Structure formats: C-alpha cells, structure tokens
Image (cartoon, rainbow, N blue to C red):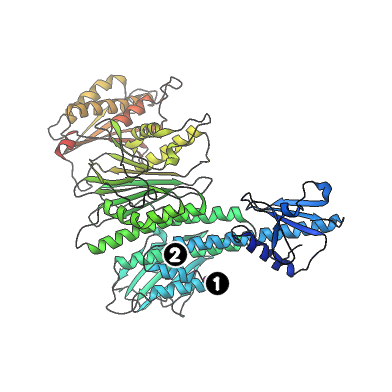
Amino acid sequence: MITAGAIPSQAACRSKEKLARQIRLAVASVGVLRGIYVYIQLPDGGLPFVVLDDGDYEYADNLQLMPRSAEEGSMSSFVSEDGIRIVVRSERGDPTILKLVSALLQGSIQAHEARAREELLLEELGANWESLEALYEISTDALRFGDINEALKRLLDRFAAIQNGLHSALFIQREGVFHPLVGTDSDLNVLTASQLGPIENAICTMNIVLLNHLTQPVDEQACWRNANSLAAAPFSWPGSVGFVVVWNEERNAVFDSSVSRVLEAITYQASVMMQSDRLSRKLRDSELLAQEIEIASSIQQTLLLANAPKDVPALEIAACSVPSQQIDGDFHDFFQHPNGTIDVLVGDVMGKGVAAALLGAATKSQFLRATANLALRLSHGAPSPADIVSRAASRLSDRLIALERFVTLVYARFDMETRTLMFVDCGHTSIIRESKRENECAFLRGDDLPLGVLPNHRCEQQTVGFLPGETYLFYSDGVTEGRSPEGEMFGPERLAECVQNWSSLGPALLVEQIRKQVTQFTQSEKLLDDFTCIAIRVKLLDQKVQPIACRSAVLECAPQSLSTVRAWLSECADSAYSGLLEEDIARLLLACSEVFANCILHASSSPGTNPVSLRAIIYDNQVSVEISQDGPIFNPLTVPPPSFDGSKESGFGVYIVLRSSDAASFTRTLDRTNVITLCFLSSRTEQSS
C-alpha cells in the first residue's frame, strides 16, 4: 500500500487508529499495489502494526508478517525525524517498484512533518504571546487568518477599536522607502524617510515616540497629516526596519503612557506574526533547522534584549548580549521612572530553541502587564519590585508548571531618592557589587525559587544601600559556565576578579573586557550558552557640581621627579576641602605614581624633552588627577592584566592603577597629548550617606 498524500506524524495522530485511517484515506487516492506491504513502528516502543485495506490495523506480531531479514522478501526501511520507523516490503520481485514506493512514502512523511512543525510553531506564537489583557482576543483572532496581511489588518482594526477616533498603519522599509503593508485607512502612500517627520528619529533610535497637540507641519503624503496626537513604535526586520503608527485627529484626543504600552505590545505581536509567516514560507522549502534558528534569534534580539539607556542622570549603564550557537531564552529590560529611578529585569528560561525564546517573550510581557496594572491602582509612587514579581508570578507559575519549564530572574530597582538597591532574586545568578573603598566584591543573593517551581510563589525583597563609584554586574550563567579546553568553568570568582580589575574604566569597557576574558579562557569565539552581561556604575559626581579648587604643576619627566610628584599630590589630597581619608590618599599616591613612572618609561630618550603636566581638581569628597604628556599615542589602561603565576611580568603597574582608582579614563587630544584621568572618592562618603 502506498499514498501520494500526507502520512501523518506522531504529533498529528495521537492514536494508532487515527494513523491507520489517515494512511488508508491517502492510499485511496492512488489505489492498492498488490504485493506491497507497509509496516509502521511508532517511537513509543509499542508493537509494530500494518494497515489493512479496510482502514483498520493489526499488530504485525499477531499477523506474523513483520519482516526480520531481507531474505523474506525485498525490503526497504527508514526512520522519520519524529522517530517513526517505516518498513516497505515487496513480494513482487521488482526492485524498481520498491524504490518508487519507498521514495514516495518518505517524501510524503517529510512533507507532512514539515507542515506539522509549521502548525505547531504558529500555535506557540499565538498562545504564548500574552502582552496585555486586551490583546488575548486580538492575538487569537488574528492568527486564524491564513493570509498574513489579513491577520495584520485584523490586528490593527482591533487595536483602533479600543478608543474612539483611532487610526493605525504598519509600514516596512524596502529599497530605501517605507511601504504601507496594512492600515485602518485606505489613504496610504509610500513614504521616504524625510517624509516621516518625528517618526524618522524614532526609527534611528529604535525608541517609541509619543506626541500630543501636534503643531509642526506634516508632509501631505503622510496618512497622519491631520493628526492631533501621534505615537509610533519601530521594530527590527532582517535587513530592514518597520514601524506601527497610531494617531487621533480629534482635537481633544491626548495619548498617555497606556497608549504607548499597548502600542508596544501590538508592535511586538505584529513582529512575531510577520516573523512566523516568514518562517512558514521557508519551512515549505524544507529548510527546517536553519529557519528555526533564524526566527528564534530574531525574536530574541527584537523582543527579549533591550538597549541600555544612556540618559539616566546618576547611573552609567552598559549591556552586552551575545547569542550562542543555539537559541535560548535569555532576556533583559530597563524601566525608567520620572525621578531618575531605574528598574532592571534580567532572566533566563530553561531550555533552548524557539519555545524558550517565546517563553522569554511571554515572561517579559507579563512583567510589563503587571507593572501597568499595579501602577493604575496607585495614586502616587511606583509598585515595589516584590509586588511586581508576585503579580507576574501569579500569572506565570501555573502555566510554567503545566509546560514543565521554569524561569530564573532578578528584578532590581536603583531608587535614586533613597539611594537604595531593592531586588528580588528568583534563583538567578548573584548580583556582583564592587567597591574600591572596600577593596572587595560582594555577591548579592536572594532566597526565592525560580518561577514555575511552586504554584503559590512568594517573593522576598532584599534592600541594600549604594554609594557613588560602586559598580553592579548582572549576568547570565552563560558567562560563568564557559569552559576551558580542559573542562574547567570560568566561574563567579574569575568574573568578580574581572570586575575589580576593569570597573574603573566604566561599564562599557568593563563588559567588553569580560567578554574578552571569557573568550580567552574558553579559547573559542563560539559560546555554548547565551552571554548576557549588564554593568551599572553609580556616577561619582553630579555633572552640575563645581570644583572647590584646582591646582596644576609641570614636572620634568625623570626618575628624580617621583618624590616631587608624591609631595605635590600629598599636598593637594591633604587639602581640607578634599575630604580624603588617610587610606584614600594612599590609594591616590600609589596609582598616580605608577602612571608617572609609566610616562618616564615611554618618554623620549632625551631627558626633559617631554615634561609631564599634572592637574588636581578638588571637589567635596573627591579628587580627580589629570596626568598629560606629549608624544606618540599610547593607552596604558588597555594593557592586559598580569599573570600571577610568573608566566608574564608586564601589567602589574596598570593592575595597581585600576585597582586603586575609583574611575580611570584615557583621551588623546588634537595636539597629540595623551591624558590619563584618575578619580578618587573619599571613604567618608559612606559614612555621610
């Protein structure tokens, strides 16, 4: 028996009866080839069975027909990707017919399994993406449409229906111009970047734009030319970008943050649907594995990983996310408050692949939803991290348990009014806190279990104070679990050592150096797990603070000047205005003396031709020292750290400088001057705080 139609896989047929009936129906389209038998062995380990002409089946052992060797008749067999073993036996003695039947049967099963995986992926995309309560019905309805444009049109129509007078459209860039894909209005035109107005800047920064009471002129070709209020959210697309725009032409219409949150969720949903459609088309070409990795990677990059904010007044933030060879569920996000406070969410979903990426997107969506729902209930202030995690966990835990998955995460808040760090740790990696004043790293941990372990999840919030100059590192297990060729793990201790060595250079260079150290340790550019690293440093000074005093000196670049340098620095640091304690002055003298000695080492061979300029800037509880010298460009701060096993002698001086200073930077001026700036905070800051 053979079939030219699709033979269902185990995922589509949940019983042998259903499998046998569908095989028989497929055979009916071709007819019966006498002397050809097809045996099916499911991967569950049960007895093999043979499909009969009446659509029923019998076990092969009962019929004593299951071939045990090639001598019993011409035989061909193969195993599908889902583990179904198919045996084709011919008693006709013609090998050509046997090969034809086997090839047709194998092709039919492969075609069906491709369609089954496509349907399963579309089902996951529709079921897991629960951004806001209002989107549940929208998502379900939209994904029922076979045509992607009809599904997106349905999505935007339902979005526009949540408020009177709303209009919406989706544009995507092709060949340098923006084409309207779908919209609630029929008056949609192709637009250039210059015709987008404020939306052009939103696309460049990949941030949502929200404007009320529009007064600036809008291009006549733009469908929002008569808008009073406007909001647009961009999204990434392979090799291009797109955006969803919503506007209201009524004079009294005003958009608030709730509109931007729903717009963000709608944009995420549209992006997932478009990515799903693109994947489905490629699955039809049988490129299953490559397309799964591509769509999952796209979901992870566009939905799970947020850019580090650059406009936080009192914090410096940098994030580095490097996907591994396989796709998994690492995610992070930042939520800024009006008073400068910022929330940080970092998480990891158990498992890999599209399912993990989708669960990560659903988890992140639930946190957005929990924050919005709790904020609406408060007359002032913001919900606490514990309340947000508890709210999200109440919606996620039962579903995760049903899926036999769990999520580790940490939700932290840097409260700029109280100068405290509040966090909830649900089984995630520890937060590393580094302080030059204490000359150590601390591991901040919580005691909560991951989401998806217990149905009634209870959260305990931890609170610690933070001080200027301190660095905090959030990371995934892909950082510490990187292995050397000998099988040794990188580990949290090595990571803490990296933080102590490089935190003075600032968050951006710190995460870059950590990545380099992990790559050097594993001796491979390919990672076995996603690499996620977020560094946050509390700024030393407010930019508006003016110095109390400034002093400068120019000294000969010679060894005999070292004693003069130390005496001059001691006088500056010992000023009553600096507030430096004795141990702080010792750090300052040690680090600056090392930099001056490095200037001597790399100076011109003619003594006195390259003098060194010193400038001390004294603030309340802080001293900054600038050391400048003309000459070839050379940044000593990038010298690799020393090897304490004696295999490498260089690097100890820079090691001392970076471990002693609270902040260090290198600049090259236009007049060919190398400038190293070192900052030192007073330990008294801790007492005054």
Q: CA distance from mark 2 to mark 1?
A: 16 Å
| Image quarter hosting the N terminus | bottom right
Image vertical order of residue 242 relative to residue 652, above or below: below
Residue 233, located in which quarter of the rendered image? bottom left
Left or right, residue 277 beside residue 349: right
Q: Name the residue type under label 1.
A: Asp
Q: Residue 292 at x, y = what percent?
A: 56, 55
Query: Does residue 270 lie above or below 252 as drawn?
Result: above
Q: Give the mark, 2 or 1, whose residue is nearer the N terminus.
A: 1
* Disc ID at residue 107: none
Provide the secondary structure element on which disc 1 rests. Answer: loop
Point out the residue furthest to the front here: 62
Q: Mark 2 — residue?
A: 269
Q: Is residue 145 magenta?
A: yes
Residue beneath disc 1: 147
- Prevailing secondary structure class for the magenta stretch in the rendered image: loop
Q: Give SS at disc 2.
A: helix
- Location of residue 63 in the rendering, given as x and y in whole percent from the top left corner: 75, 55
The residue located at (47%, 72%) in the rendering is 141
Amino acid bearing label 2? Gln
Q: From this viewpoint, is residue 634 visible? A: no
Q: Is residue 382 visible?
A: yes
* Residue 21 in the figure: left or right of residue 368: right
Q: Specify the segment rendered in magenta.
A: 143-148
Neighbor class of circle 1 (other Cα within 10 Å; few <14, some 14-19, many 20+) is few
